[in-house]
Image (cartoon, rainbow, N blue to C red):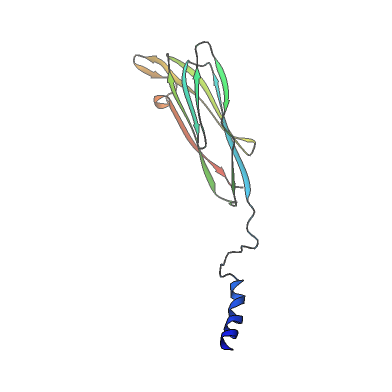
Amino acid sequence: MKKLLLLLLCVPLLFTSCNPNNTSNPAPFINYEVYSTLIITNAVPGRYTFQTSMSTQSIQILPGDSSGIFTNDIFTYETDATNGYMPYTTNLLFLPDIAGCTDIEIQTFFNGVLFNTDNFQIGYSSFSPNVACDNTIANNYFMKTINLPYQ
């Protein structure tokens, strides 16, 4: 009889939880989308490597080509976070074939809305000695991290 009484008292405990979090009504997940577009004008021939936190593209500009627009993959992430930030990094590396300055614009879109724009020149106006087209871009390498807000 004691075993039966003990069993009857323990069975309800199997269907309850000691977890203090409310798992019956969890916070809803929110989808966020982010992507970047690389716009090249007045292009200098060479290899451009465009990288974001989520993807990489290798672009070869040939002599006679003067511009191009390249969009990386749309990254969708799902989270239940509603405050704070997610870091998102864009990188551009340029290995030029000849001296010259390329105009660059990188646009970052967050949930379909333009969130950030960077404009600069990349390349060398001279190789002997190396004279950068834009003093803020060292060694033909651009990198920037922006914080995308959870909303």
Q: Is residue 30 above or below residue 132?
A: below
Please tell me which residue lies in front, 45 or 19: 19
The residue under the point 60% across, 47% down is 78
Q: Quadrant of the N terminus?
A: bottom right
Picture layout, residue 53 above or below residue 14: above
Q: Residue at x 63, y 48 (%)?
A: 30
Residue 133 spot, x, y in % from top left: 44, 19
Residue at the extreme left of the image, as rendered: 129
Image location (x, y in percent) of residue 46: 46, 18
The reply to whether residue 46 is in sight is yes
Question: Which residue reaches farthest top?
Answer: 64
Seen in the picture, residue 11 relative to 40 is either above or below; the reply is: below
Please report the residue visible at 57 percent of the width from the left and 20 percent of the height from the top. 68
Q: Position of residue 14 (x, y in %)?
A: 59, 72
Residue 96, located in which quarter of the rendered image?
top left
Where residue 44 appears, x then y in whole percent? 48, 15
For the question of whether residue 136 can be seen, the reply is no
Q: Residue furthest bottom?
A: 1
Q: Is residue 137 left or right of residue 119?
A: left
* Front residue of 10 and 31: 10
Count of picture labels: 0
